[in-house]
Image: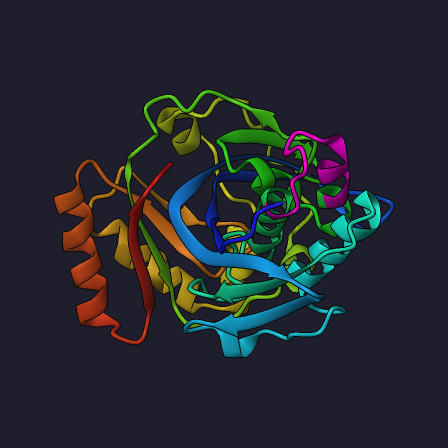
Amino acid sequence: MATTMLFETAFAKINLALHVRRRRDDGYHDIETVFAFAQAGDALSAELADEVCLTLTGPFGAVLAVDEADNLVLRAARAVQQSFGIKAGAHLTLDKRLPVASGIGGGSADAAAALRLLARLWGLDPSDPRLMTIAELLGSDVPACLGSVTGWADGRGFPVQPVEAQGLSDTPLLLVNPGVAVATGPVFRAWDGVDRGPLAADASIEAACAGRNDLQPPAISLAPVIGELLALLADTAPRLSRMSGSGATCFALYESLAARDTAAAMVAARHPDFWTLATALR
């Protein structure tokens, strides 16, 4: 087992396109989505300890709960202990850099990072299927975040089908959040129920542009500032700009780092209270 501090990044998840096809009898929705991951995200560290515990830091750390009922990192750790019969503990520290309830993976990415990190800390096989089973039980986005590779998914969002990122890797990426938390449930409930057609399982910029995010209109109806943000991003000449997930974070892809940084400066000048992250796709 490891005896030193280990580190893992909880990569932000970007829905390049997200089609909602129907509402299921179990209350969930069948979706089709192509997603990619940013090179940046929350930072998670861990070291061996007598028991499992979590420390929260970072600009958004104070927003989260540190109890097992509500924190996905702690739930992931307990699930690994139980599934693998682990007696050791771990002191986990989550540097929460991404906004909460913002449509870019967030807690799901943190939980997936915890699974990867604890597998290393406790000497487990990272390919053990029990880790994926735990991921599926923790939430619909956790399986995709576990691998953090470009992929396509339908149904509730898993199983994930990795797809080749056609020219997407290292694409300059700007993430912007207008400072409003948009809960997933109300956004899905506000969806108009119209099936606007399938999404190709193709992770290219062309396919993403031809797709859409069916949750974008209902999210804007609940938080009109999202529409204002999208209009601003459209003025920065991106290759693609769209809301991610159920919002409120929006993203824009650019041809160059200079174009991305110019756009970031424009957003910061007009809305200094908005959260921004200039990064790139993995």
Drawn side of residue 34 relative to residue 157, left or right: left
Q: Magenta residues, as a range?
A: 121-134
Q: Residue at x 37, y 21 (%)?
A: 166
Report whether 9 appears left or right of 172.
Answer: right
x, y percent for residue 30: 72, 38
Q: What's the residue at 78%, 50% (across, down)?
A: 86
Q: Is residue 89 above or below residue 55?
A: above
The residue closer to the viewer here, 156 or 29, is: 156
Farthest right residue in view: 25
Relative side of 58 to 189, left or right: left
Tally the marks.
0
Which of 182 and 61 lies nearest the eye of the viewer? 61
Quadrant in which the N terminus appears: top right
Q: Is residue 181 magenta?
A: no
For residue 32, above or below residue 54:
above
Image quarter for residue 171?
Answer: top left
Q: Is residue 227 left or right of residue 222?
A: left
Q: How is the image coloured?
A: rainbow
In this rendered view, identify the residue nearer to me: 56 or 22: 56
Based on the displayed image, in which of its 4 quarters is residue 19 positioned? top right
To which quarter of the image does residue 133 belong? Answer: top right
Query: Can see residue 29?
Result: no
Q: Is residue 132 magenta?
A: yes
- Where does the image place residue 189, in percent across and percent down from the top left? 70, 58
